[in-house]
Amino acid sequence: MTDPVRTDPVRVGLLGCGNVGSALVRLVDEHADLISARAGVGIEIARVVVRDLGRERDGKLPADRFTTDADAVVRDPEIDVVVEVMGGVEPARTLMIDALRAGKPVVTANKELIARHGPELFAVAADAGVDLLFEASVAGGIPLMRPLRESLAGDRIRRVMGIVNGTTNYILTRMAEAGSTFADALAEAQELGYAEADPTADVEGHDAAAKAAIIATIAFGARVSPDDVYTEGITGVTADDIASAETLGYVVKLLAVAEAHEGAIAVRVHPAMVPMRHPLASVRDSFNAVFIEGEAVGELMLYGRGAGGGPTASAVLGDLVDAVKNLVSGAKGATIGELVDRPMTPIAETESPFYLLMEVADQPGVLSAIAGEFGRHGVSIKSMEQRGIRTDARLVFITHRAREADVRATLAALRDVDQVRRVGSVLRVVGEDD
């Protein structure tokens, strides 16, 4: 005998109803027929956990479906699937673990939680035999986790590199295209809702670092936390850097880079000079894009809206449909597999070309003195140009590929050269063939 086909809708407990949660409620309502056809059964948002019951809602759900008791929703035997979009680590972590152990699939958009506690949660989900899906935790509406987990599961990923923070990309775009200062571009981003009142997590790179940790974990099957990610934000990027980049044929982007080489992993977030011919250079405003390099597949790029209620809710809904299909059929989606511990390459041991800007005394012998320090530390100069004369003299260098530790040693030595007034900006160059 075959099991009876389920006809009643799958009941969802929604933890959180902010921008993403409320957008998800709208999508479930507006796309009900499509969802039912693809999932094989209807989906009903049965309970919604909120902080304030008195706050006005958009009217898609009756008032009696809202509650402040998250524990009761997770424990409710009539709730089949839990969707977590409340954010933060606790109580979200405990609620998700309780739901998984109760045999309920969980869908989440919580990058901080997956970055910090992903391996623990993956293990709980595996033990319980239910899905834990988190497409929306990285790059908003861009499908990234599923391709890494499923489509590329049989390939060896060499590198994943991308723009995964829309706020910083908007700021850098405005600085490049409108000549805005960092402060003015940030204020614009805040007015448009791209940046929070406290933009620290975005502009200092912490948001991108959490996403980079998740990407590296999935791409390389290894335990990677945000603490393993070298993190540098964009607050030090100047108008001179933006102008120099354009003159030299580059654009400045905040990149998350995860690489695997000879059994070790290097994961970092930092501003970088990207050649204008590289696909990532054309990603503007608040858009995100991720560039994947695999041994068999070659190069892929995924592009789209990386944040916002609608795009993120779309990714959550895609996971929810998958979870419901698996729940109804008694199947389980693609797993993470067993995560391993792999050595992490420190930033000092990574290699790339570098852009260097320094203010110098415009006098005979300055180039020889500076070139001597580069040579003594094993850093080869690819190109050099002088800008300004006399008291306004500046030198701009692009190096060949060099070890970070050697470049740092060069910079330390240059600061002691009499003709060098100031060592200014230092940016890594990413995407060159060199």
Image: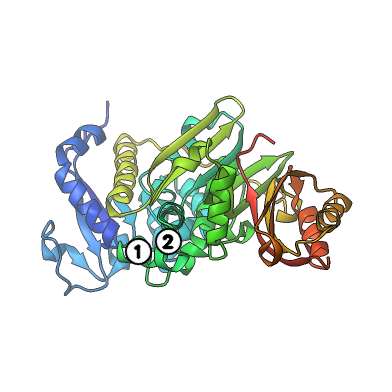
Specify the amino acid type for callout 2: Ser
Rendered image: mark on residue 397: none
The N terminus, quarter of image: top left
Q: Nearer the viewer, residue 111 or 47?
A: 111
Residue under the image location 83 percent in, 52 percent down: 371
Q: Is residue 74 visible from the viewing direction of this image?
A: yes
Residue 314's quadrant in the figure? top left
Judging from the image, what secondary structure is the residue with disc 2 in? Answer: loop
Tell me: 15 left or right of 206.
Answer: left
> Above or below — where is 254 with respect to 193?
above
Q: How many marks?
A: 2
Judging from the image, what secondary structure is the residue with disc 1 in? Answer: helix
Disc 1: CA contacts within 10 A as few (<14), some (14-19) or many (>=20): some
Q: Nearer the viewer, residue 176 or 364?
A: 364
Residue under the image location 75 percent in, 61 percent down: 362
- Dots 1, 2 in contact, CB < 8 A: yes
**CA separation in Å, label 1 and label 2:** 10 Å
Specify the amino acid type for callout 1: Glu
Rendered image: mark on residue 188: 1
Q: Nearer the viewer, residue 387 or 107?
A: 387
Q: Which residue is mark 2?
A: 180
Residue under the image location 72 percent in, 41 percent down: 263
Dot placed on the residue nearer the N-terminal end, 1 or 2: 2
